Amino acid sequence: MIENRSKTTLEYGRFFLPGPTEVRPETLAAMTQPVIGHRSEEIQALIGAAQSGLKHLFGTKRPVYISTSSATGMMEAAITNLSRKRILCLVCGAFSGRFHAIAEATGRKADRLAVEWGEANLPEDLREVLAADPDRYDLVTVVHSETSTGTLNPVREIAAVVAEFDDILLAVDTVSSMGAAPLRMDEWGLDYVLTGSQKALAVPPGISLAAASERALARAGEIEHRGFYFDLLKFEKSLGRLMTPNTPAVSLMFALRHQLEHMVEEGLEVRWRRHQQMADHTHLWVASLAGETSRHFEIVAPPGYRSPAVTAVRLPDPEEMSGPEVVSRLRERGYAIAAGYGKLKQETVRIGHMGDHTMEKLEDLLDELGEVLIT
Ligand SMILES: *Cc1c(COP(=O)(O)O)cnc(C)c1O
């Protein structure tokens, strides 16, 4: 094991960003194996081994594509491969808004169905819009865990609404929920599911993962200009030979294989439960902080729609102590959390209780954070 933590690096277990997340030393060490060729039997063995873990994780029988890109790449793939008409983007924060921005950037037709940041996208609102003009859209996009606000959208119920309409696909961003919140691609009838390596999976940044239903793949086949690097048909074809279309980040794939084994060992349901416990504990902590101080510390997401992976907390007086100020004071104590995202930067902070964090480490963090917020 190479010891390369510098003096300014945080101690293990103190890095609570909502992505990238803390990576176990064993996972980092897995990346130091010699590089292998991307057209070799070794890569086929590596990808083959990763496939069984990935299918289990996604809850699918479909192959899971491995893309050397950050998660936004596989978001772009959804937009460029899955719609020949018009896209409806469910928006409740920054990342869900990104689907719409990608549609604009790639010249696709798209509308937003938006709620206030922090609120959840509700199935009944979606049904109303789709029912008003059932032929207008052929793709709906949704983010499961909106990392900018800590909101968890009811994806299973949203999928049931989409299924009431013919010929509309559902693409789901599970970047911060995969491995943290229950999600079953096949059982819930999701057409396209994407995630990234660097959030709840606790693998370093640099690869993203996605699976497409048969129906989604058939749709991609009808689209003439799917782009080149993010062509789902190319991913599907290469994966048939346990390869990727282009040279992949093999070192990161070693880390991914290692981490998948670790997750299977822990058990998916145990992992989901651990995340829920960390989230519940954080919610209680916010409530007690508000009680003790009689100040308005508040969770951004409403009850019933809170992500088990990340909590955004609204600060009582951002003028006096802003999100970035809290982050820098906590950093002096050797801990990392994130300030708010985008327009919530000043008024909120975000705690990423995801990946391989434990209750014990989380309690230590919240003790320190409490001291910062009270003084
Ligand atoms: C982090 C994140 C993304 C973007 O991921 P990149 O890997 O930075 O491209 C997209 N969606 C959600 C929900 C995220 O949390």
Image (cartoon, rainbow, N blue to C red):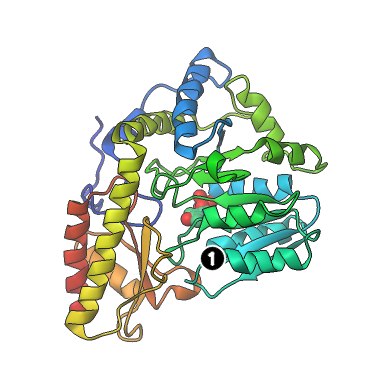
> What amino acid type is highlighted by mark number 1?
Ala
Residue 272 percent coordinates (x, y): 35, 47
Q: Residue at x 52, y 13 (%)?
A: 41
Q: Quadrant location of residue 149?
A: bottom left
The residue closer to the viewer here, 39 or 45, is 45
Q: Please say whether residue 193 is visible from this viewpoint.
A: yes
Q: Residue at x 58, y 29 (%)?
A: 247
The N terminus lies in which quarter of the figure? top left
Residue 60 percent coordinates (x, y): 53, 35
Vertical side of 299 occupied by 110: above or below: above
Q: Quadrant location of residue 165?
A: bottom right
Left or right side of 370 for 52: right
Q: Residue at x 54, y 61 (%)?
A: 95
User: At numbered mark 1, what does the secondary structure look like: helix, strand or loop?
Assistant: helix
The residue closer to the viewer here, 1 or 74, is 74
The residue closer to the viewer here, 193 or 61, is 61
Q: Residue at x 37, y 55 (%)?
A: 309
Residue 181 percent coordinates (x, y): 41, 50
The C terminus lies in which quarter of the figure? bottom left
Q: Please say whether residue 15 is visible from this viewpoint.
A: no
- Label 1 CA crowd tier, 10 Å (few <14, some 14–19, many 20+): some
Residue 331 percent coordinates (x, y): 25, 63
Q: Quadrant location of residue 362?
A: bottom left
Q: Residue furthest front?
A: 164
The residue closer to the viewer here, 192 or 254, is 192
Is the CB of mark 1 within 8 Å of ligand 1? no
Residue annotated with mark 1: 94
Left or right side of 51 for 222: right
Left or right side of 34 for 169: right
